[in-house]
Structures are given as C-alpha cells and as structure tokens.
Image (spheres, rainbow, N blue to C red):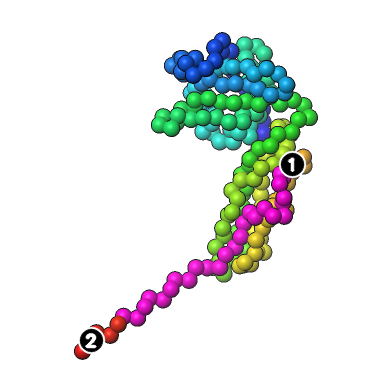
C-alpha cells in the first residue's frame, strides 16, 4: 500500500508564465494544490527533489503530505509536465484529499503464472493488452500494482478484468467483463520459402 511521503514547499506570491519561469530560474518547480472545495494554493518545490520523486516511479499513485510554511496538507499528484529536452519538471498539480474520500488512479498490471500456462509451454505467445487499469480507492489503500495469473491458460484463452485480484477497498472502474487484459495467441508460423525456380535449359 502507498505510504505517506513528506514534501517541503513554499508559497508563491505570483502566478502566470512569467512568474513560473522566474521560479524555475531559482531551482524550484512551480506547483498548485487544489480541490476539496478550497481555493487553489500556488506553491514552489525543490526542482531536484521533485525530479527524483517523479523518476522514482509510482509518483501519481503516491500519497504526500505537503508542508507549506508550517501548514500541512494531504494530497495526491494528478498531473505533471516535464521539459521535453531537459526532462526537468515544469509544473505539478496536486489534489487535496480528506478522510473517507476516494480517488481514481491508474495502477500497473503484473502478469504471473507464466510457468504454469500450457498454452505458453506449447509455443503460444502472451499478449498483454492493458498494462495499466483505472481503479477507485481511498488514497491510503492505493496498491503498487494488481496481479493477474495466466496459470492454466491454453492457446486462444483470454483474461478479462474480472480475473484481477483486487485488494479490499479497491474497485475497478468501467466494465470488468469487457476489459481485456491478456490473451494467449497461437505461435507464429513462418511461411515456407518458395521453391527456387529451375534454371532454364
């Protein structure tokens, strides 16, 4: 489950593109905290630490507590932008979360049981259709990933969303029965090379 991580931030007095560029020149990343019926708060984060958090993985499914000049707010990242050339963070959006609230997030799907799939052992190929799925869950219960097993699957078999192992408190959004996750397809057979034409006499 997602652990709450701490972030230090400072308030930004000015907003807009010019102000954001000025913040970045100081080695900071502009960000905003919004939601929960409260006014948005413009903040600035340490750019190096923000980049490390993003590239550490699971950034958009991690629960954070931001300390803004002594005022602590529990949030979850909703979006971020990176510089297309330097890969440095340009901006981060945080959503306020409160007790009892649920959020929708994308989490990875991990496939297990390949060694126990007759279809794969007989030369079939596993095609992963969905690498992530959207779930609704309280921020404190966000899983790092969900597992689905191909154990026992034959060539031609397909796993849908209802095969996912969902922890307590986790709901899959959308239609579980129609969501295709994994399918085992027949082995590809190379076409036999055409016979060489006989040389003319």
Q: Is residue 163 visible?
A: no
Q: Position of residue 191 (x, y in %)?
A: 43, 73
- Please report the bounds of the magenta region as a residue range: 172-196
Q: Quadrant of the C terminus?
A: bottom left
Q: How many numbered marks, from 0 up?
A: 2
Name the residue rendered at 49%, 19% in the picture: 17
Q: Pointer 2: residues within 10 angstroms few (<14), some, or many (20+)?
A: few
Q: Can residue 8 be found in the magenta stretch?
A: no
Residue at (55% x, 29% y) in the render: 80
Kindly identify which numbered label has been placed on residue 170: 1
User: Can residue 177 be found in the magenta stretch?
Assistant: yes
Q: Is residue 35 above or below residue 19?
A: below
Which corner quadrant of the image does residue 97 belong to?
A: top right
Residue 200: assigned label: 2
Q: Which mark is residue 19?
A: none
Report which quarter residue 178 is drawn in: bottom right
């Amino acid at each position: 489950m997602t652990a709450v991580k701490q972030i230090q931030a400072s308030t930004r007095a000015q907003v807009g593109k010019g102000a954001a560029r000025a913040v970045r020149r100081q080695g900071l990343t502009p960000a905003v905290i919004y939601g929960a019926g409260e006014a948005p708060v413009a903040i600035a984060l340490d750019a190096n630490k923000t980049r490390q958090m993003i590239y550490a993985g699971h950034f958009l499914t991690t629960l954070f507590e931001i300390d803004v000049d002594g005022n602590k707010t529990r949030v979850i990242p909703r979006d971020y932008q990176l510089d297309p050339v330097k890969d440095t963070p340009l901006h981060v959006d945080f959503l306020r979360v409160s007790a009892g609230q649920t959020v929708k997030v994308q989490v990875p799907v991990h496939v297990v049981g390949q060694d126990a799939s007759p279809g794969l052992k007989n030369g079939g190929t596993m095609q992963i259709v969905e690498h992530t799925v959207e779930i609704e869950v309280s921020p404190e219960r966000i899983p790092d990933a969900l597992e689905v097993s191909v154990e026992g699957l034959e060539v031609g078999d397909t796993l849908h969303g209802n095969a996912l192992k969902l922890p307590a408190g986790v709901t899959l959004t959308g239609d579980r029965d129609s969501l295709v996750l994994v399918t085992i397809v027949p082995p590809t057979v190379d076409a036999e090379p055409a016979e060489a034409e006989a040389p003319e006499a």
